[in-house]
Amino acid sequence: MQIARLYLRVSTDEQDLARQADIEHSARQAGYYIAGIYREKANTRSWTAR
């Protein structure tokens, strides 16, 4: 059995994690057991360059 953990991240307000649901579907279709899904919505605009 192949095991995967998915890390889904978007970095702008215009992006949506729901669009990345295809990644989970594709992994399952390829025979992976999904042990965990980690979702993060970060806003890189709030970061300051150093």
Image: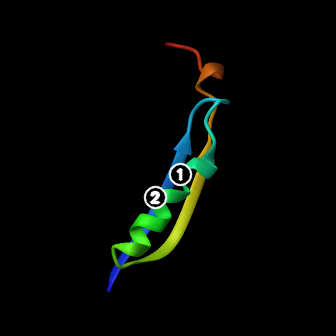
Q: Is residue 8 above or below residue 2?
A: above
Q: Residue furthest bottom?
A: 1
Q: Is residue 44 above or below residue 24?
A: above
- Residue 23, x across and y down, in percent: 46, 58
> Label 1 crowding class (10 Å Cα cut-off): few <14, some 14-19, many 20+?
some
Q: Amino acid at mark 1?
A: Gln
- Residue with the mark numbered 1: 20
Q: Are marks 1 and 2 in contact (CB under 8 Å)?
A: yes
Q: Which residue is found at the position 33% from the left and 73% from the top?
A: 30
For residue 24, side relative to residue 13 (left or right): left
Q: Which residue is found at the position 49% from the left and 76% from the top?
A: 35
Q: Amino acid at mark 2?
A: Ile
- Residue with the mark numbered 2: 23
- Residue 25, x across and y down, in percent: 48, 67
Dividing the picture into quadrants, the one containing residue 32 is: bottom left
Cα–Cα gap, marks 1 and 2: 6 Å
> Label 2 crowding class (10 Å Cα cut-off): few <14, some 14-19, many 20+?
few
Q: Which residue is found at the position 39% from the left and 74% from the top?
A: 29
> Label 1's element?
helix
